[in-house]
Image (cartoon, helix red, strand yellow):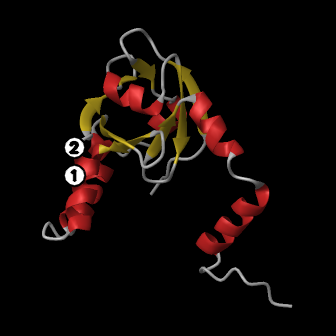
């Protein structure tokens, strides 16, 4: 299975369409049929899921208990901003204007491959996120994620 990776910056036209990066397009599973779901991200960005990957997200969300506050809030605040979209004949993707406003995207967008999905950032918000993470914090986070959560140094 191929995974999305890399960073690509593209301009947005006056109708809110962005050229979908060719290197990422080659990695889209044919099962997605060039259809995607765009949703507001947890940070000030958007998440773009190929339709086949979105089905996995929905399956996970369906496991959330609707009778708990956390389950309802998670589903409500993720699914209510989910919008279907597809590549057009020029391999552009249309992003809803309210999604662009949420992510601060106006004239340019940065696509970042995140494995099974793609983040879409405004260059300014991405720069702020990058600047807010110093090297020591990144190292600690990377060790937690890739090292099994044990951050203590063995002397």
Q: Measured along the vertical axis of the image, is residue 7 above or below residue 59?
A: above
**What SS does tag 2 mark?**
loop
Disc 1 designates what residue? 76
**What SS does tag 1 mark?**
helix
> Does residue 26 appear in this view?
no
Task: State the image coordinates of residue 105 (x, y, percent, origin top left).
Answer: 48, 25
Q: Quadrant of residue 33?
A: top left
> Does residue 27 appear in this view?
yes
Task: State the image coordinates of residue 67 (x, y, percent, origin top left).
Answer: 13, 70
In the image, 102: left or right of 4? left
In the image, 57: left or right of 146? left
Q: Quadrant of residue 83?
A: top left
Q: Are marks 2 and 1 in contact (CB under 8 Å)?
A: yes
In the image, 134: left or right of 41? right
Q: Which residue is drawn at 33% across and 22% down?
A: 97
Q: Which residue is drawn at 36% across and 41% down?
A: 40
């Amino acid at each position: 299975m191929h995974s999305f990776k890399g960073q690509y910056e593209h301009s947005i036209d006056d109708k809110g369409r962005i050229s979908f990066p060719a290197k990422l397009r080659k990695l889209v599973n044919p099962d997605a049929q060039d259809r995607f779901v765009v949703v507001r991200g947890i940070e000030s960005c958007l998440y773009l899921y190929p339709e086949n990957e979105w089905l996995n997200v929905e399956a996970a969300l369906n496991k959330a208990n609707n009778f708990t506050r956390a389950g309802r809030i998670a589903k409500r605040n993720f699914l209510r901003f989910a919008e279907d979209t597809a590549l057009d004949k020029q391999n552009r993707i249309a992003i809803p204007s309210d999604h662009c406003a949420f992510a601060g995207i106006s004239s340019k967008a940065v696509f970042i491959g995140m494995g099974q999905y793609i983040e879409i950032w405004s260059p300014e918000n991405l720069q702020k996120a990058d600047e807010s993470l110093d090297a020591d914090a990144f190292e600690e986070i990377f060790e937690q994620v890739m090292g099994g959560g044990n951050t203590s140094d063995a002397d």
